[in-house]
Image (tube, rainbow, N blue to C red):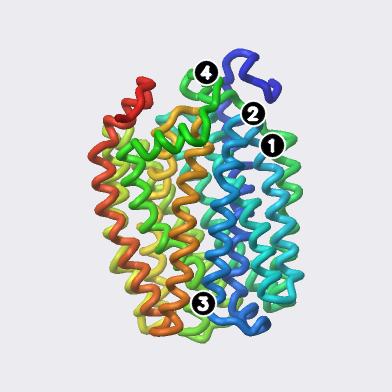
Amino acid sequence: MSDNATNEGAFEPKPTYSAFVLGVLLLAYILNFVDRQVLALVQDDVKLEFGITDSDLGWLATAFAAFYTIAGLPIARLADVWSRKGVLAVCLTAWSAMTVVSGATTSYLQMVVARFGVAVGEAGGTPPSHSLISDYFPPERRATALAIYGWGIFFGTGFGFVFGGMIVEAFDWRTAFYAAGALGIPVALLLMATVKEPPHGSSEGRTDTAAPSIGDILRRLTRTPSFVTLMLAALCQAFLGYTVLTWGVSFLRRTFEMSPAEAGFQFGVTAAIAGAIGITLGGFLADRFATKDARWYGWLSAISSAAALPFALGFAWAPSPVASIASFAIFYLLNNVYVSSLWTLVQNLVPPRMRATASATQLAILNIVGMGGGPLVAGYVSEAYGLRVALTVAALVGASAAAFFILCARTLPRDLANVLSGEETP
């Protein structure tokens, strides 16, 4: 079947092929986080070489988030009206190349510019992938499929920290960037050669042919109460999540005097295993319960967000590295249960031709506050009070997501019904 499947009848991929496509998209997403997290591993080395401060490192994250957000909506719009796999392949190539450039920088300003390039490329990673997954997997299996795709966060983080740490100790921090960036081109070629472009809405038997404007999409999202409260909850979670991923390895290195390889290995492996279990559990439970009562998307997320708080505090205040890592494992498992529900709702709360743009809108909102605000605030708090206090502040913000998830659950049945009926949300 050609890429222009819309004109060739029903698109009915075999389950094995759908699983293969999901695997290719997962591989690209792993690289998305490998390239993103390398800086978090080597930031203390960059800080020393460039003579910068923790707040300067925080501003690097903020610049990344700003550039990611600026590029995200137009790239996602392109994915909604053009080839989603084509957009993803081009962007994967771009962010991989700019990761290599990051390793060649010789000043703080050059690093900011290089991270701008990585951010623009990575802005085109998740939205087209989410939209493709929604057309390869029907609603009753979508949360699990998106959860498996979400493994990329944790495998990418784990791989980046573990092998990046080894490369830093064997060579230097620049080589870690070179090695991470070099992996992207083969995956981009694999994507273009093997993934078919399905028609929008194919998994639900819909034939949406016209993509609405960005303005129409944004108006619909802002008039959907469930989406608004979902974003408020996700903002709180993103603030915590990006703070921990940005400063977790530095916390272990500074507090317990671990080497880059040791801290990267322990943090990375724990994050990969615990995070993957958490998001998979969340997807399984969402497909099991929320397909019968959509409010479970919000209820499950609220319960897990609140339950994660004591373990987040344990990570920050444990007296030994063993206790700290053990607390981190439980915290990270619980705190990622919500992710598959978040992604599934963003896809389900809009018609098919809006999905990539809706995903980009969600990422833009989360990254401005989460990636842009969390690490930056933590950097300033760290300079004044230390990283333990910075992580504590982030943990309290993350736990407050539970209240917004509960509010989201209240309006979900009506808002989802409006999408199925084709009505606008009042």
Residue nearest the viewer, comparing 213 with 186: 213
- Locate residue 363 relative to residue 237 in the image: left or right: right
- Locate residue 72 relative to residue 235 in the image: left or right: right
Residue 263 in percent (x, y) is at: 54, 76
Element assignment for label 1: helix
* Contact flag, marks 3 and 1 (Cβ < 8 Å): no
Q: Residue at x 37, y 48 (%)?
A: 231
- Locate residue 104 relative to residue 138 in the image: left or right: right
Residue annotated with mark 1: 86
Mark 1, residues whose alpha carbon is within 10 Å: few (<14), some, or many (≥20)?
some
Q: Earlier in the sequence, mark 3 or mark 2?
A: 3
Name the amino acid type tagged 1.
Gly
**C-alpha separation, residue under disc 4 versus residue under disc 3:** 49 Å
Label of residue 197 in the image:
2
Residue nearest the viewer, comparing 8 with 263: 8
* Contact flag, marks 1 and 2 (Cβ < 8 Å): yes
Q: Nearer the viewer, mark 3 or mark 1?
A: 3
Residue annotated with mark 4: 207
Q: Residue at x 49, y 62 (%)?
A: 372
Label of residue 55 in the image:
3
Mark 3, residues whose alpha carbon is within 10 Å: few (<14), some, or many (≥20)?
some
Q: With respect to residue 329, does 355 lie above or below?
A: above
Residue nearest the viewer, comparing 323 with 110: 110
Quadrant that contains the N terminus: top right
